[in-house]
Amino acid sequence: MNKLHIITPVKDSPETTLRAIDSIMSSEIAVDFSYFIYNDFSTEETTELLQRKAEELGFEHINLADLTTHPSPNYLLVLQTAQQKAIADNAHLIIVESDVVVEKNTLQALANYASTLDKPGMLAAVTVDKTKRINFPYLYADKLPAGVNNTRKRLSFCCTLLSNNLLKTFSFEQLDPTKSWYDVFISHKSVELGFNNYLFTNLPVLHMPHSSRPWKHLKYSNPLKYYWRKLINNKDKI
């Protein structure tokens, strides 16, 4: 496999989004890759900024407002569209969230591991904070050994490669449209289908959680308010 499709779903948060974009576009990637920004109903100002950066840096800006009237979040549409594109181009798919900053070698390392490890399904870089401590959503990884870890625990889409074989085996058209997020389900589905999922504690990436949806910080500061808002507004279904 010598191609990568890299995607970043974006919902405003222009400061962290620009950091994510710049880290990806300045990565040292030896294989052929294409980069797609999926703009999920950001403000007009953020949309104009993304279009300018696309013209400047050469990635593709996909404005979901041109494809659907469904309100954000539209992760299902992003996954389905990205899957179709990656399969058509015989490429692995790497998701890098807009609140993640990758290292120069992160993406190429994931591609290398996808070519050498046994039956790879999902391959994820561990997330850390500014002090280099492992943070959400991989707090459980703090007890794992440094390096390559074959895991049955759920992986996040913070910075994760979905192998071309996994994409061809499980259609995202089968995902539940009533949900908002799909990383947990796809993690377990990958293992169920006989693939191995890997978490790399030797590939740290900076994660600034929930920068695009700051209300979700209530999960840590005021859990009762978070779960009440989640229930009342029918949000954040996993």
Image: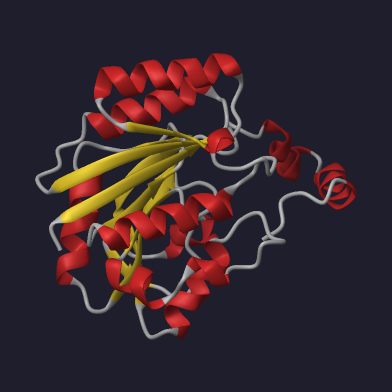
Q: Is residue 124 visible?
A: no
Percent across and percent down for residue 152 are: 46, 76
Question: Which residue sits at x=15%, y=63%?
Answer: 1
Drawn side of residue 235 relative to residue 35, left or right: right
Compared with 18, 37 (above or below) is below
Compared with 170, 92 (above or below) is above
Q: State the residue in front, 229 or 146.
A: 229
Drawn side of residue 15 relative to residue 110, left or right: right
Compared with 164, 31 (above or below) is above
Q: Is residue 43 visible?
A: yes
Q: Quadrant of residue 103?
A: top left
Q: How is the image coloured?
A: secondary structure
Drawn side of residue 147 relative to residue 63, left or right: left
Question: Which residue sits at x=54%, y=35%?
Answer: 66
Q: State the residue in front, 171 or 183.
A: 171
Drawn side of residue 174 relative to residue 34, left or right: right
Q: State the residue in front, 95 or 134.
A: 95
Percent across and percent down for residue 76 are: 57, 55
Residue that lies at the very extreme toward the left in this rendered image: 30
Percent across and percent down for residue 141 are: 45, 60
Q: State the residue in front, 11 or 224.
A: 11
Q: How many badges with numbers are in the image?
A: 0
Question: Which residue sits at x=18%, y=49%?
Answer: 108
Q: Quadrant of residue 116?
A: bottom left
Compared with 21, 144 (above or below) is below
Percent across and percent down for residue 19 are: 39, 25
Question: Which residue sits at x=43%, y=31%?
Answer: 130
